[in-house]
Image: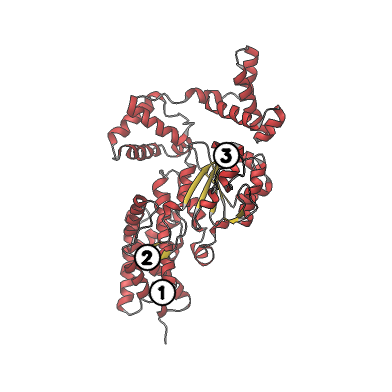
Amino acid sequence: MKKAVLTSREQHFFKTVHNAAFANPFSDLREKLDIEIAGLFPSADRRESKDLCIKKVDYQIKKLEKQGRANINAFHGQDQEIILVVFLFDIFHKFRDDFDLLIKNQIKAQNTSIKVPFAEKAMHMLHEKGFDDKSIPHYFSLSYQLRRAFYFISNSLVGSSPCMQKLKKHLWYNVFTYNIDLYNKFLWNKMEDFSTLLLGETGTGKGTAAKAIGRSGYIPFDEKKQCFAQSFTQAFSSLNLSQYPETLIESELFGHTKGAFTGAVDDYKGVFDRCSPHGSILLDEIGEIPNHVQIKLLRVLQERSFSPVGTHETSRFNGRVIAATNRPKEEILNGRVFRDDFYYRLCSDIIEVPPLKTRIKEKPLELDDLLDFTIQKMTGTHSHKLINKVKRIIDRRLGMDYQWPGNVRELEQCVRSVLLRRDYKGNQTRGEKKSVSLKQQLTQGILDQNIDVSSLVSGYCKLLHDTVGTYEKVAALTGLDRRTIKKHIINFNKD
């Protein structure tokens, strides 16, 4: 049977669509390709160019349908590879709004996977375009994953400053790699081997970034039940390691058997046991865990296995590990936070979440976007009146150069304070303290004889911790136990 051939003009157009389908949606390249496909000037509005781009692709495919060439099996070689991606691009965008509604409804339903009312129609379209029965549910699942990733990265991480655009672009690569074709052919069911470390100051939104990754994993479609194998709300879980004493960290991570230690009255499943095969776990404040726990976590990352406390029986972990810490990048790279073997296995990808002061400095209007998002989350509505009210308080009480030491979390508190009391004083004193080194503060306090013992010990522990990097090393230098050291440092950070 003679195969169809794309004309040079068709090949150029569809190749551009092919490239757009593989481009990172948060990149300048994708915007440029959408504009080229739409036939607009470079200054065109992004939303307008995307909508027109989709219409142009639909128009060109309808021409193929009239000519009896709208089937991947009508082509061969490079033409077939191009047209396959073009058909996927077209069908994906035809159901873009349906996917968005499905995401919203699934959030309401939480952990019960809901039926997909448009699945049959979408898969019938794929069948008409020549896709085989085995690949159709896979491509439908991949389409849902693509839309979820865009939805959560775009909607939960507010802001369009250069550093935020860089973050969103990086998060997309973390889910799909730099090449979606590579991901689709080799990695869609093997991403558990790629662990991630999120860095950033306290309150920058590391948890939100982790959640965007965790809710964007591949989940297969169950054709018999007409729903996905699992709700994406169930696919992400988190554990803040700093809230547990050292004696309980292992139990929370790996679980324990009845009688493993005093108080273990029943078997208990740890976070790795509770994680689904399609899921991800966020291990928050991972920079504070001791060496022996790092060794056990290394086994999980390398061998995908672990043993609950109190038994030598092994269990398998099939999820993906995302870790987060507010420890400075320099300390991590200098080996003051993690064992070398643990660091190299944990950090397949390091993502830095920018501080609020950097975001506002790069783009002052980002503050308005964040205020709008925060106020809408609190009140359920957009309100320019409330945005302007909060901005007036910020301008009057804090000034344009305020550093926002608490980042986005502090901004949320600022909005609450303004709505409650029509005032917010900020954390100016904390910022002033940081302009003088901790060593100078302690020395001056001793010379002036106006520093109390608790502040002196807490400050000294913090100073040592900043230098040597772990609670264990500070404990060895001071003769205090690890929990006392941790308590002093936490109390210092609260002051």
Residue 385 in the image, given as x and y percentages of width and height = 28, 33
Quadrant of the image occupied by residue 409: top left
| Viewer-nearest of discs 1 and 3 | 3
Q: Mark 2 or mark 3: which comes first in sequence?
A: 2
Q: In which quarter of the image is the N terminus?
A: bottom left
Out of 32 and 97, give the one closest to the viewer: 97
Residue 215 in the image, given as x and y percentages of width and height = 45, 52
Residue in view at x 60 percent, y 27 percent:
488
Q: Mark 1 points at which residue?
A: 131
Q: Is residue 288 visible?
A: no
Q: Which amino acid, by three-letter code, is at mark 2?
A: Lys
Q: Name the residue under label 3.
A: 263
Residue sitting at the far top? 449
How many residues crowd around disc 3 within 10 Å: few (fewer than 14), some, or many (20 or more)? Answer: few
Q: Mark 1 or mark 3: which comes first in sequence?
A: 1
How many residues crowd around disc 2 within 10 Å: few (fewer than 14), some, or many (20 or more)? Answer: few
Q: How far apart are marks 2 and 3 (CA)?
A: 43 Å
**Numbered disc 2: secondary structure:** loop
Quadrant of the image occupied by residue 467: top right
Q: Which mark is residue 323?
A: none
Out of 182 and 145, give the one closest to the viewer: 145
Out of 73 and 485, give the one closest to the viewer: 485
Q: Mark 2 points at which residue?
A: 225
Q: Which amino acid, by three-letter code, is at mark 1?
A: Phe
Residue in view at x 42 percent, y 51 percent:
233
Scheme by which the image is coloured = secondary structure
Residue in view at x 46 percent, y 36 percent:
356
321 relative to 453, above or below: below
